Image: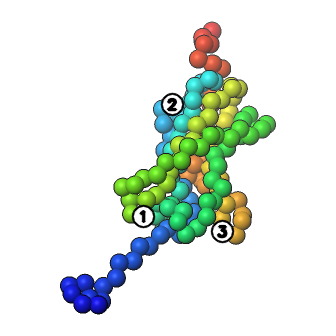
Amino acid sequence: GFGANAGFYEVLVYSGPTADVDVEYLGKAAEGVARVGETLTMRVFPKDAHGNKQDYHVFEEDGLRVVATVNRLYESEFALTRFVDDSTVPPTRWYEATLVPTEAGAYVVRVEFEAPDGRITRSSAGSKEMALLASTASRAT
């Protein structure tokens, strides 16, 4: 080409496959204590092996999910709401995960996603154990 930009090309580089997540717990969940009937909320930021926020442009969705094992008996899945951060180039995605617990006890929260080869990966960054109190209406005796 001719002109000031001769020989220069703009290349947009996208993130690699999801390799880990950053997790931010909000409210009481950040302290590891919550109450039955009160929403547990966390933000999940998928990233590739180099720490880049996930844009899902080249690599397909990764089956991201947030799960709590309740009292070591059963699993309860968080609802995920997807958000797009248009302030990044390319635009990246993050999720808000919410769960309204209905049973008091110990909740072990984890974030899972599928690696490109189909294996389920559990991120240690999202792992947290929480003690849920009986309810917002209960009193200490």
First along the sequence among labels 3 and 1: 1
For image coordinates 50% across by 61% down, the residue present is: 55
> Looking at the rendering, which quadrant does residue 77 occupy?
top right
First along the sequence among labels 2 and 3: 2
In the rendered image, the vertical position of residue 119 relative to residue 84, given as above or below:
below
For image coordinates 57% across by 49% down, the residue present is: 126
Q: Nearer the viewer, residue 8 or 54?
A: 8
Residue 82: x and y in percent read 54, 47
First along the sequence among labels 2 and 1: 2
How many labels sit on residues? 3
Q: Nearer the viewer, residue 33 or 120?
A: 120
Q: Which residue is mark 1?
A: 90
For image coordinates 42% across by 53% down, the residue present is: 85
Label disc, if present, on residue 116 of the rendered structure: 3
Residue 83: x and y in percent read 49, 48
> Looking at the rendering, which quadrant does residue 20 occupy?
bottom right
The three-letter amino acid code for the residue at tag 2 is: Lys
Pick out the residue farthest to the right. Answer: 73
Which quadrant of the rendered structure holds the C terminus? top right
Asked whether the viewer can see residue 82, the reply is yes
